[in-house]
Image (cartoon, helix red, strand yellow):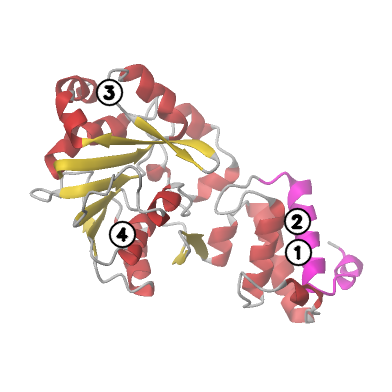
Amino acid sequence: MTAQAAAELHTIIDLIRYGASRFNAAGLTFGHSYDNALDEATSLVLHALHLPPDLGPAYGQARVLADEKQQILALFQRRIDERVPAAYLNGEAWFAGLNFKSDARALVPRSPIAELILEGFEPWLAGREVSRALDLCTGSGCIAIAMGHYYPNWQVDGSDINDAALSLAAENKQRLLAHNVELLRSDLFDGLQGRVYDLIVTNPPYVTNAETDALPREYAHEPELALRAGDDGLDLVLKILRDAPDHLSEAGLLICEVGDSEQHVVRLLPELDLAWIEFKVGQMGIFAVEAAELRAHHARIAGLAAQR
């Protein structure tokens, strides 16, 4: 932008409006914590000014100093030129009402599972008691740590194959004082021998090869290991469905996110009784399934998984 244009921006609201306009004009893709240009611009401006995200609207007319303005405009330019997700520029993301550190070691926290955590996983748990829970493929640790935060009587494990992601999860565990969360390195269930859970929650890689190749540039900043999952997106999901019964208590429950690969799950396993969860915004490709149901269809699931 020209120096003259920058000189005409004076207040917080001026910069938010300008950033949103620039983002829309640049054709950015949203979906990493924020789903629109205005919210992303707001987050970047308030972050640069060290102001809280719930800042009252009256402060919108507060004037911004010249050096503050330059920092904000530099963030805007990086967002446009490099297509870096705003959460990576800010270094933080909100999930289930908690503030997590976010960087390129793991996906930006954004799963609809946050809504389930805040609602106690009801009605899917149907009042059953949970003493041990697992977040499989924990990434940044957001699901495990949020479960530990809201349910302090649970012992929660968070596992991942990616050492870099686990290092970020460890920082978030310390950041949010999640004393009842244990982080473990494991390739799916391979490193969890002997551990049994009442609830397993997983947001594994489930993006198809074709979809991964076609993702907007913003997603290239995230680890591909956490996205790509074969031609139908189910390379890991089928292994999870196969092995989960060995780690679920008799009345245990598995909740699994598969996104748009829902259609492939239904096609491959029409006989499996999956409860597709309805969220406030509709279905989001997340199902709940009872341990007994997985055990009843284990042979069929194992056969499909063996083909991967």
Q: Residues within 10 Å of mark 4 (few under 14, many from 20)?
A: many
Side of 255 where 95 appears, left or right: right
Magenta residue span:
2-28
Asked if residue 140 can be seen in this view, the reply is no
Q: Residues within 10 Å of mark 2 (few under 14, many from 20)?
A: some
Q: Nearer the viewer, residue 270 or 27?
A: 270
Residue occupying image coordinates x 42% and y 40%: 227
Which residue is the site of mark 1?
A: 16
Residue occupying image coordinates x 76% and y 60%: 19
Which residue is the site of mark 4?
A: 166
- For residue 272, the mark is 3
Instruction: Name the front one of labels 1 and 4.
Output: 1
**Magenta stretch: includes residue 26:** yes
- For residue 20, the mark is 2
Alpha carbons under labels 1 and 4: distance apart: 34 Å
Q: Nearer the viewer, residue 69 or 56?
A: 56
* Residue 96 percent location from the top left of the image: 45, 59
- Asked which secondary structure carries label 4, the reply is helix
Q: Overall secondary structure of the magenta stretch?
A: helix
Q: Residues within 10 Å of mark 1 (few under 14, many from 20)?
A: many
